[in-house]
Amino acid sequence: MEEYNKLKHMFDKGTLSRRDFMSGVAMIGAGMAVAPSLLSGTAQAAAPKVGGTFRIGMEGGSATDSLDPRTYSDSVMIAASLCVMNGLVEFDQSGKPTGELLESWEAKPGAKEWVFNVRKGVKFSNGKTLTADDILYSIAIHRGETKSPAKGILKQITEIKKVNENQIAVTLEAGNADFPVILGDYHIVVVPDGFTDWQKPIGTGGYTLESFEPGVRLVFKRRGDYWKAGRANFDMVEIRNIQDPAARTAALQSGQVDAINRLDPRTVNLLMKDKKLNVVRTKGTGNRFCFVSRVTDKPFDNKDLRLALKYGIDREKIISQVYNGFATPGNDHTLDALNPFYNTAMPQRKYDPDKAAFHFKKAGLGDAKIELQASEGAWGSAVDCATLFQESLKKAKINLDVKKVSADGYWDNVWLKVPFCAVYWGRRLSADQTFTQVYGSGSDWNDSNWRVPEFDKLIGEARAELDEKKRKELYFHAQEMISEDGGMICFAITDYLDGYAKNVMGADPHARYDMNDDRIAEKGWFA
Amino acid sequence: MLKTIAIRIVLGIITLWAVSVLIFAATEVLPGDVASAILGQGATPETLAVFRHELGLDRPAYVRYLEWFFNALHGDLGIAMTNKRVIVEVITPRFMNTLFLAGYAALIAVPTSVVLGIIAAINEGKFIDRFVNILSLMTISVPEFFIAYVLILYLAVQFEIFPSLSTVFPEMGFAEKIYTTALPAFTLTMLVMAHMLRMTRTSVLSIMSQPYIEMAFLKGLTRSQVIVRHALPNAAAPIISVIALNLAYLIVGVVVIEVVFVYPGVGQFMVDGVTKRDLPVVQACGLIFAGAFVGLNTVADVLAIMVNPRLRHPR
């Protein structure tokens, strides 16, 4: 809180801009929910202006992209879909679910039965009024015989039905207090009942699609009658696909685009000096970089070896050398500090060669070599991180062999198959989803193969618990279990770094995704 | 001579067919498959099986080859597995873009390098010869993205003369296209010039020791007259084949340039296809690239036969 007060003081004195204050708050993890209320009456009071063509240069698209929500996997299509369509649930700056097309909801005790209210008076771009049928259809396409990645998270629905034109009822197989968060998954966007023409999607969003060349450009036009007041302020929005970070940066610097995502952390310091630009940093909500061992494979079935490796990695050094400081140390689980259930009481694990040597000796493996497989295919700098890991283990007299493997087919042939390899995880919707998908016994992606009935029970209890305080206790304990016993060394969580031209307003950090939760086209405006 | 040309063309077609087999075989042995590449981390064994069946990946390879080959002969390259678009419709504008950029670069590079090569040959060993040699060697010695970034840094970011994003769109006029794609065209020019320039110079010079050249000198012609009238026609064949090779490179080998300048050509399309394991897309790109390569080389061979005075006037 001391850090927070310092920032607040600086802000009040006027030495800190609103944006810096916000990102500062995000940085110390004080929870951004409090920040906007403190700032009301200042910069936020400025009403958005309508007009202009907003050009965004983004990484995360490809020539194989499609607007079919069952195929979304990266930023460009997520941002594009939210121009034309709306989700069921939106998230505020702190990451809390708020109503979008599902205006409000209520759970019966036990969180097994839910009732959702459909927003009234919302019109699709073809003039049709939104009803419960459209919502049911948009959820149904992700269930049953489908390749949708959202299929897994919707499996818990046992019954979903229309109560009346503006209300739906959902029954789950077991209680889940986070169910509205699950419905906020980016794949679930709403189209009219029975809609299939994904080349020309019809939605309730603030813009309509003008043209779409996959991997090149999407153009959107303002609808003008958007149901969210003060949103979708640009006359035109253009999303350009720019894969190369240097090309993106050059395009922003020379004014050919107004906003770009995924700045290169190695050069972002130079960009911050540019007076025409505004760098927005969201601390520690990006990718979670891990080295994952399978606890069922030798020699990683030995808990002391796992602890030795956790103490033997120099997180700070990797973060400063590979990420230029634009990442936060991970605490050996994949929940980030902006999540409301993040265990703040558990001390951050630090590099301690003595402890590492102690546990390694206790493991009684002699001077056995341990092999870590890494590849550019895991993430760009995985091999660099592995090499630094190898270096830091030497001080604890542990020999690590870093084997560089092919990027091609990495997720098919290495991940989930070899005993020890580099893996990154993205942010999951909720604490529950994080724990269930990454560490749950029933998950196909439990890459450390750490399957502990006691842990599953704990997560199950927390899932159905509607009392926040009790849930927090359960989740705190879950994190301790993973960190102490699990097979994962989660050493860094990256920052999201967006670049904007100075005249782009509404570019605030968001607890979920970069580019203001991929909604900058909807939330932004030109000064 | 006509017979020689006909043989070349038939050989070209056979090569193309052999390449089609190779392309298909190569895409078969890529590690991983399209279903898991598309679904990525979101794949579960169940969704994978559904998707594989949907894509027809559970049928034997030879059946899929024959189907693909006969469709390709009819100009049907199939439908992209990933986004269900008709490949011919998507690839045609991209291939046109690639041809546009290649043509643009070639129009600058070919005349410049041939003329400079001849000038260098005329002035062998003099300052101008050394100068163009060193300059062209320098541009070919640095990696292409380096030239590209240097050009972007000075001409786009610092002085804002040309745009750094060279994406062209259908609605753009011809002049606008030329302006937008100036930087990639310059970069490509620098990349291919050295090869052609040095080949022109060397082949002209190698002819210079022939007896008929000495004869021309003895007739009292100047050095430049000898080179342009007597040496050049006989040196043309190797120059043409080097030009064809570089034109082919401009079409098939510019992925890096496309990425750096965000140019929507076939190269990036193919790379996206490979990473997502979209086999029909990869095969279509491979076939088009092979077609361009084989086609240009056949044309070069035919031209070389036609310009060779001895083959043109058989005794």
Image: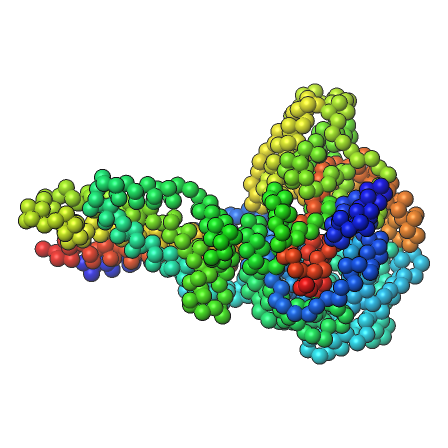
The residue depicted at 57 percent of the width and 38 percent of the height is A405
The residue depicted at 94 percent of the width and 58 percent of the height is A109
Q: Nearer the viewer, residue A155 or A127?
A: A127
Residue B20 in sight: no
Q: How many marks overall?
A: 0
Whole-percent x, y for residue A497 in the image: 67, 49
Q: Nearer the viewer, residue A527 or B248?
A: A527
- Residue A285, above or below A123: above
The residue depicted at 34 percent of the width and 56 percent of the height is B108
Residue B223 in sight: yes
> In which quadrant of the rendered image does the C terminus of chain B lie?
bottom left
Whole-percent x, y for residue B225 in the image: 14, 52
- Residue B90, above or below A428: below
- Residue B275, above or below A520: above
User: Which scheme is used to colour this image of the protein?
Assistant: rainbow
Whole-percent x, y for residue A479 in the image: 82, 41
- Residue A473, above or below A400: below
> In which quadrant of the rendered image does the N terminus of chain B lie?
bottom left
- The image quarter containing residue A79 is bottom right
Relative to A377, B251 lies left or right = left
Residue lying furthest bottom in this view? A127
Whole-percent x, y for residue B310 in the image: 14, 53
Relative to A20, B197 lies left or right = left
The residue depicted at 30 percent of the width and 51 percent of the height is B113
